[in-house]
Image: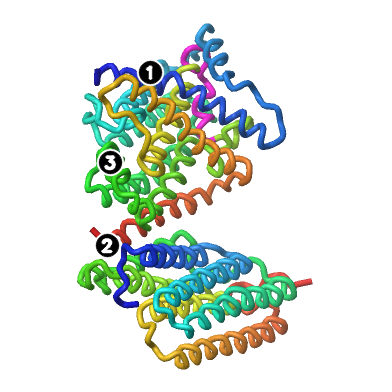
Amino acid sequence: MQHLSLTSPAGVFLSLDAVLILLTAFACLGSKLFDRYLTYYGLQSVLLAAAAATAAVVTGDNALWVLASLTLCLKGIAIPLAARRLLVSRLQLQRDAGIALGLSTSLILGAGLCAFAYLVIGPQNLAHGLISRSIIPLSTAVLLLGALMMVVRRHMVAQLIGWLIMENGVFLGAITLTASFPFIVEAGIFFDVIAGFLIMLAMTTGIAERISAASLAPPRREPS
Amino acid sequence: MPYLLQFLQSLAVVALAPLYAGVLTRASALVQSKHGPAILQPYFDLWKWLGKASAVSDQTSWIFRAAPYVAMACYLAVSTIVPVITDQPLPLAFLGDLLGGALVLGLASFVMSLAALDTASPLGGLGASRTTWIGSLAEPALILVFFTVGVLSASDNPYLMNHAIAASPLAMVLPTHLLGAVAFFMLLLAETGHIPIDNPSGTIEISMIEESRVLEYSGREYALVKWGGWIKLFLLSAIFMNVFVLPWGLGDGTSLVGGLVGILAVLGKLAVCGLAIVIIDSSFAKLRFFRIAEYLGGAFLLALIGIVTSYVVAK
């Protein structure tokens, strides 16, 4: 996988896919409806599953097929659906009022972080014409964007989404570069993250039901 | 022969721009289940306006009367330097590069804003202020978009960009190029006053952006102003299709037949671009004014990421 050429069909597809993943991270950062966060996060996870499937095709490793389908089912479908049912339908969370920084400002900061990722990774020093050249900086940028999302959003659910985006960034780098990584380790981390997310979602729900908004911003109207 | 083709290109732009606008209007109406005006309606309108006397307020100066002619000259100048019907540079192609073209289009917009201020009508000032604000946000993004194609073709001349992309189809699917193309399309919509920035068929003066600058014009000057707007839409769409999306099918710059085939090719390509514009016009709402900054910031961001990802272009 590390030796995949950037100009082969799989290489072109992977770098496009990684750019789209980056764009969904930006879309999350630039929206302020909980519904949108979940949509973009689900889309990002589907793209990530496509990347994992490409890696599985290239390496012929069956474990990667399992990871790809797990990613698609859990992160691409289950989490967005369950979270939407819980947060949007039941708790009527709609507009994220806990935004610490204007959307345009955070987008520009995000673009700066993206450039920073390219600066510190220095892809021009990496091996010429290989897929790692395009994927490593992009996955680092996604990770940094997730971190930025956690910084500029005050609402707990939004911060959770930021955390999941960070995790997607790490996963993207890991899946496309180190396919020889033991499957059990990746799957273990995967389930840790899912479990953590579910626990936090449950906590958020509890808190939100009690005080009606888990936000440090001024309290909003009681949900009817 | 090259000079003949040069003349043919500008003539085609000037003569076919109203047709493109008419087709767009008719197609939008059809998509919205209306009948719509005839495709040739812009020509009838031009004919009517050109035959009318022009009423000019006695509060205006020569700036107001000169502006439509200056703007029209700017559009004609741009029509000589961009690839519309040939992919070989024509004699005047090296008057300026894409940045130069953007500068000249900026000059046209500037004189129209001056003219709107000159009338001292409240709506004119409003329109001038809004258009200038949008232009000042769109311009940096536009320059970055030209850099994204410039990175791939190592040039800022539209003909060479066209060659570089037509020569290697792989370049079409590179992230840099795709992001640049999407950003340019977003800017095209903003520059020509289409949804989601402005409603081209809007009739409420207070919410107009581009149109409210020209409310004071009538008769021949009004014809020039409208015609100029159509030419701008035609030119930007032609650049989008010939440089970014479908760089093939143009004449080779030595034979008249190639040029005539190029005209047909560009009409076909504009139909594709127009379809995209019509779909967006009919399926989105106009943005709230202060969200336009976010829209243009998005275009800027796409172009910036395009340039950043060009680091990894495999040469």
Measuring from the top left, give residue A1's x and y in whole percent.
35, 77
Q: Which mark is residue B163?
A: 3
Cα–Cα gap, marks 2 and 3? 21 Å
Q: Would you name the residue on which mark 1 appears?
A: B11
Cα–Cα gap, marks 1 and 2? 41 Å
Q: Is residue B315 left or right of residue A22?
A: left
Q: Quadrant of residue A93?
A: bottom right
Same chain check for tags 1 and 3: yes
In the picture shown, does residue B216 fall above or below A46?
A: above
Which comes sooner in the sequence, label 2 or label 3?
3
Label 1 is placed on what type of residue? Leu
Name the residue nearer the viewer: A194 or B136: A194
Measuring from the top left, give residue A48's x and y in whole percent.
49, 72
Q: Is residue B269 part of the magenta span, yes or no?
A: no
Q: Residues within 10 Å of mark 3 (few under 14, many from 20)?
A: some
Name the residue nearer the viewer: B160 or B306: B160
Q: Is residue A148 visible?
A: no
**Which range of residues does the magenta coloring cover?**
B209-222
Measuring from the top left, give residue B265's x and y in whole percent.
42, 30
Q: Residue at x 30, y 49 (%)?
A: B168
Which comes sooner in the sequence, label 1 or label 2?
1
Label 2 is placed on what type of residue? Tyr
Q: Is residue A201 left or right of residue B222?
A: right
Q: Would you name the residue on which mark 2 appears?
A: B311
Same chain check for tags 2 and 3: yes
